[in-house]
Structure formats: C-alpha cells, structure tokens
Image: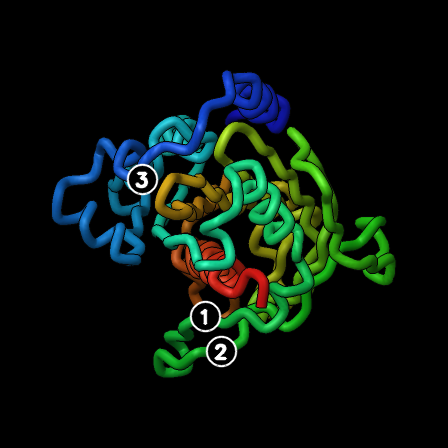
Amino acid sequence: MPTKKAIAVLLLALILLPVFAFNAAGSFLSEYPGNLLESFLSGEAPEMYTVRGDRVSSVLPDGTIMKDLAQKVEVLDYAFSQSLSTFCPYPDSLKDLSDSEKLLAVFNMAQGISTIKGVTYLSHSSGYKEETLFSDAYVITNPEKKSSRIDDPVSTSVPERQSCYVYLRDSRFGGNVYSVEYYCYNNEIFLEITNYKAMKYMGFKCVEKGNLHLYLDACLTDEGIMISGLAVAYNQKPEVNVLITTVDLPTAFLKRVASLKNWFIDRIENYGN
C-alpha cells in the first residue's frame, strides 16, 4: 500500500513541474474513443470501478495528479477504487478572467466547505429519489473538537499546498471528521479527503481510520474545467454486512464522490452570483 508519505512525495514532485498555460480540453483525453469524448465534453460523467475490472485511470485527464495516482492504485490487490470525470464549460463570470485569476477563483470555491451542506444524491433505497447526503459541513481547527468551527477560508493567492480539517454529517455514515489536503500546480487544483477516525454504518464500524481517500480534481483548460473524482479504499472488503444489510462500499463511495463533483460544478456555474 502506498503510504501517506509516498503519495505526498509523488504529489510534491508533480508540483515542481514547469508551469504552462492552459491547453485545449481534448489534449488531456488521449484514452477517450471518439464517441466517449463527445459525450464527455457534453457533460456526461463516465464511471469506472476496479471491482468490475475497469481501469479507473482511463477516464481521467492526462498529465494530472489525479491520473498519475489512479494508475498507481488501480493495480493494487489490497485496495479497490472507482472514478468518474466530467466537463464544465466556463460560465460568463469566469470567461474574461486571466488564467491565474481563474485558478485562484476555483481554489477558493474548493475551500467553501460549508457550501457542501445540503448536497444531495440519488438514493436507490428510497426509490431513486434525491435525498440530502450531507446535512452539515464546516471547517474545524481541532479534529478532536467538532465545536472548533471556523468560517471557510478565502485566499488571495494560490498556495502549492494547504491543509485543514472538516466535519461532514453523512446521511448513511453519520458525522465524521476528515483531513483535507489541497495541492495546486500549473492548471490543477487537487483535493485529498481522508477519514480521520473510523466510520460507522448504523452504529457499526465499517471503515478503519485513514482507509478511505476521496479525491476531487479540477483541471483548467482553454474551454472549461475537467472535474474528476476518485475514491480509494485500502485494506477494505468491497462489501460489509451490517445486521441484515449488505453495504456495497464501492457504490457508496462513488456516490459521495459524484455528489462532491456536482457540488463543485454548482459552485463553478454560479460563480459571482
């Protein structure tokens, strides 16, 4: 299993790559066949799961932190991962900004943790209806004290790396504290969200501390932003039996990544409003 330190070294190495201007969206999608590329640029979000033999890296933008990480974890036999990616054109409020201004705007959107509150998902158990996934969300200064809430930070420049702790109340996994690492380089804003403590389902522990990593990535191009999500669980069985219920963790984790992706798109589309 790649240690936290090893992943950090990988990401820091990528951060030191030379800076370049934004490129056309198509230049990041070498593995996409023509029909999938067209649907992707139209806003569809292809999904991949290692538990069904998919290459989760195949739908992620070339040359990004996200793709490089996915290529490393998708071959591990003690982890399962799942990914998705989609494209969001720049709204009018972002089009006229310079590349550096766009990057700063997107970074600050990613820091708006409190706006995750109220994000929904499609619940199969409720007859495919939209339900609230995160009923509360905020940044905290002390991971041992949920009461140490602070306002969402706002930056005046884009750092290479930044970290914080957040509290998210999940409709299925309850209230949990997560560590969040932000990595920024070139045209990319990358988030790593890791469970700070063990996660429970219906009161029963199902994910050990530090085993779940949710990744969200924004790759800025000439035409818009490619938003990718990746969930990786180490040393976890894909299914967990809780009383008379079987929890399908790959599906559950990707739903959360998809909801975070939708949250990010909403932030982008409503920038300036």
With 129 as the anchor, is 30 left or right in this view?
left
Name the mark nearer the viewer: 3 or 2: 3
Q: Amino acid at mark 2?
A: Glu
> Residues at badges 3 and 1 in contact (C-beta under 8 Å)?
no
Disc 2 is placed on an element classified as: strand
Work out whether mark 3 precedes mark 2 in sequence or the reverse, and give the earlier one: 3
Q: Can see residue 232?
A: yes
User: Could you tell me how far apart the alpha carbons at marks 3 and 1 are, in whole angstroms?
Assistant: 28 Å
The residue drawn where x is 44% and y is 47% is 229
The label shown at residue 131 is: 2
Give the residue type that dot 3 points to. Answer: Ala
Find residue 49 and name its label: none
Residue 152 image-quadrant placement: bottom right
Q: Kindly identify which residue carries mark 1.
A: 121
Disc 2 packing (10 Å; few <14; some 14–19; many ≥20): some
Task: Identify the disc placed on residue 25.
Answer: 3
Between discs 2 and 1, the one toward the N terminus = 1
